Image (cartoon, grey):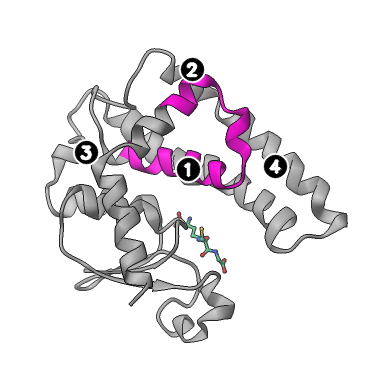
Amino acid sequence: MKLWHCHNARSYRPLWALEEMKMSYDLEVMPFPPRFLHKEYLKVNVLGTIPYFVDGEHHMTESSGICLYLVEKYQRYDFGLKSDHPEYGAYLNWLFHSDATLTFPQTIFLRYTRLEPDEAKKGAGLDYRKWYLARLRMLDNHLKDHEFLVDGRFTVADIAIAYALFLGESLAIHEDYQPQTRAYLERMKARDGFARAQAAQIVENSD
Ligand SMILES: N[C@@H](CCC(=O)N[C@@H](CS)C(=O)NCC(=O)O)C(=O)O
């Protein structure tokens, strides 16, 4: 297995999952954004986005999808739910919610306020910051009385959702998180698997 990654970018989801599962993999860490700073990457991934993941004949570009793939392909249900589980629908919903609903608005904020600051578009960026916080409502409610997202234990759904919260922290949006949501993010970041993923990207980076 090989994962192409940029420091703390969305490829962190599969990197964290690989570390939690203690799987062996190759990691290539690139400068961000690789589309401009590592142009040969476009030969690997025509989109120029990260993550890019290869496992035999399987090629993937979706961070939460790769986490689900690892559970299914390698039968790692210690980090996921089988389809006959009563919370299977909720599990898939959190996995897809993580990027489509929670990460996407943050990237508009990031783009128009940090990566390509533009006075004319700044308003749209700030609007999407608000939009993101409003979209946290379902998670905020769930975390009032749950330690994890499903089945009372850690799964790849927690990786996918906690990464979105972690990205928000790097954008200083976390100051407006609800207390239970901040506490959840802190619990997830305190995991050994999270620390191993942090170390993996730094070691690889300095090679
Ligand atoms: N839905 C995809 C999005 C992938 C994506 O857009 N990744 C961002 C990094 S967080 C990227 O590569 N941006 C740089 C660019 O578009 O050049 C996923 O969940 O992995």
Amino acid marked by disc 3: Gly
What range of the chain is rendered magenta?
157-183
Point out which mark residue 166 bears. 1
Amino acid type shown at disc 2:
Asn
The residue lying toward the viewer, choosing from 108 and 178, is: 178
Residue position marked by numbered label 4 in the rendering: 128
Q: Is residue 26 magenta?
A: no
Percent of width and height locating residue 129: 68, 40
Q: Residues within 10 Å of mark 1 (few under 14, many from 20)?
A: many
Q: Amino acid at mark 4?
A: Tyr
Vertical side of 152 occupied by 26: above or below: below
> In the rendering, at what x and y percent does residue 153 appear?
23, 27
Say whether disc 3 or disc 4 marks the residue closer to the N-terminus. 3
The image quadrant of residue 30 is: bottom left
**Mark 1 CB near ligand 1 (8 Å cut):** no
Ligand 1 closer than 8 Å to label 2 CB: no
Q: Amino acid at mark 1?
A: Phe
